């Protein structure tokens, strides 16, 4: 019932191979990481597409010159926030 010594005349139970144990632990860790990364996200592909679109728009904003009076940049940020692309 626990970690006691084997009865006299009986052999000790086989211990699991260390390599097998490490492989199982690594596999379980990878599975947990994948689950944690996608927790709450039903469609991973759409999230990646939105992220790429957001990065593209931010890059366009950064490469375009400074807008007069700063109105356009503020409007774009508000638009991105309202559409859910940009999280604040």
Image (spheres, rainbow, N blue to C red):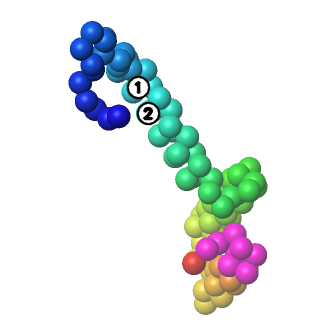
Total labels: the figure holds 2
Q: Which residues are magenta?
A: 80-87
Residue 9 seen anywhere in this rendered image of the structure: yes
The verdict on residue 34 being magenta is no
Q: Where residue 85 is drawn, which disc sits there? A: none
Q: Identify the residue under disc 1.
A: 21
x and y percent of residue 3 in the render?
28, 32
Quadrant of the image occupied by residue 71: bottom right
- For the residue labelled by badge 2, is the local secondary structure a helix, a strand or a loop? helix
- In what quadrant of the picture does the C terminus appear? bottom right
- In what quadrant of the picture does the N terminus appear? top left
Q: Residues within 10 Å of mark 2 (few under 14, many from 20)?
A: few
**Residue in view at x 47 percent, y 40 percent:** 29
Quadrant of the image occupied by residue 8: top left
**Residue in view at x 71 percent, y 73 percent:** 84
Q: Residues within 10 Å of mark 1 (few under 14, many from 20)?
A: few
Q: Disc 2, disc 1: CB below 8 Å? A: yes
């Amino acid at each position: 019932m626990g970690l006691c010594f084997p009865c006299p005349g009986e052999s000790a139970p086989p211990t699991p191979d260390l390599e097998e144990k490490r492989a199982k632990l690594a596999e379980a860790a990878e599975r947990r990481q994948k689950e944690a990364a996608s927790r709450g996200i039903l469609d991973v592909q759409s999230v990646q597409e939105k992220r790429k679109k957001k990065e593209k728009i931010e890059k366009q904003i950064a490469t375009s010159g400074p807008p007069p009076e700063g109105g356009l940049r503020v409007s774009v940020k508000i638009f991105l926030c309202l559409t859910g692309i940009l999280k604040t």
